[in-house]
Image (spheres, grey):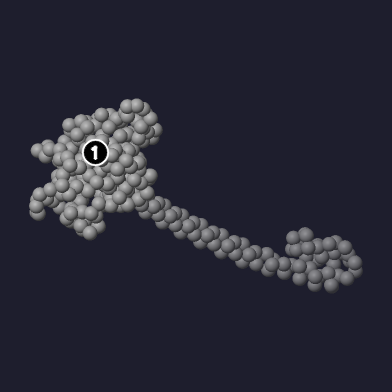
Amino acid sequence: MNTAHARRFASLCLLASLGACDARGNGTGPLDTDAASADTGAPGDLGTLPVDVGTPPVDAGTPPVDVGAPPVDVGAPPVDVGTPPVDVGTPPVDVGTPPVDVGTPPVDVGTPPVDAGGFARYRRTDTDATLVEACTLPGAQRVLRNADDESTTLAAPFDLRFFGITVPQSLGIQVYSNGFLSQMAIDPTMAIVGRLPSASPPNGVIAPYWADLVTGADGVCSVVVGSAPIRRWIIQWKNAHFFSGMDTAPLAGTASFEVIYNEADASMDFIYETITGQPATAPTRAAVGLENPDGSLAFVVCPGGRIDSTPRAPDCTSVTTGTRFRVVPLAD
């Protein structure tokens, strides 16, 4: 390579920014010169950089779109947060229910006075009626002599009115040796223990003195006195003994008493000739009062029951020798 060519080559290399040249001097000068010219055109490539450099702003501009999306998501929680007040508002409905349940007890609590005999469609008053010795009167019917846990049917002399219900004369009434009457006939051994009120049979009870009794030779006497519409039906237990006193001599405890049903106003007189006392060893206590036909309601003077139950049945201290009172039905 001559000196002129070498200078020209150096100039071209300088224009190619030095890096595009390789002073390899291989004797192909013209080809190198063309190549150098092509490389010299590289500044056109350098000019494209602004296009590439300008592209990032397009990409960089995209994030605001993504960044703007969160406010939409963030805005969603208030909808969810707003839901709880609806659920929280529900409890007042449930809370409001207890007063209804709480209001029920007064109904149940109100029942005891009825069971206790205060005002179960009847009231207790004084009476001017006196004892009638039914067994000695003409036409008296005598049943259940020397009877222990026995019963029989008595024919009623007229329709009866009981707890506001008419009991037709044709039905009669069941009389028990254990000191009570009932609209229901059952095995008398089931009627040893009297408790008022009780859904267990017998029900529809008139109990002048329901206890475990054994009748004497007089048994139970039934007689009607007077004329319609003011007749009186008298049923008398005469000289009965307490079963628990039958093992002693003389016999411990006797009971003579009667109930008189008054046709005129459906009232009843309870009259006690002799009540000498139930032996302390007796397992039951006397029940005195009235019970409606299904055993759900009773007018109670003495509740009766067993002494080995909880609570223990109380003694019937309100009925003794000489006691007498009238039970009057309330207006229907």
Q: Is residue 228 visible?
A: yes
The residue drawn where x is 30% and y is 50% is 152
User: Where is residue 130, by image quadrant?
Assistant: top left
Q: Is residue 325 left or right of residue 211?
A: left
Element type where label 1 sits in the image: strand
Q: Position of residue 167 (x, y in %)?
A: 21, 56
116 in relation to 15, above or below: above
As rendered, which of 53 and 223 lies closer to the eye? 223
Which is nearer the eye, 285 or 47?
Answer: 285
Residue at the image position 10 percent from the left and 49 percent from the top: 226
The quadrant the N terminus occupies is bottom right
Q: Quadrant of residue 220?
A: top left
Across and down, in percent, residue 59 comes to: 58, 62
Q: Is residue 49 or residue 228 the one in the foreground?
A: 228
Q: Is residue 184 above or below residue 36?
A: above
Give the x, y percent position of residue 322: 17, 31
Left of 241 or right of it: where is 236? left
- In front of the other: 221 or 63: 221
Where residue 33 sits, quadrant-wise, is bottom right
Amino acid tagged 1: Lys
Residue, x 76% and y 71% (percent of image)? 38
Q: Say whether residue 307 is visible.
A: no
Q: Which residue is mark 1?
A: 238
Residue 76 position within the rendered picture, expressed as x and y whole percent measured from the top left:
44, 57
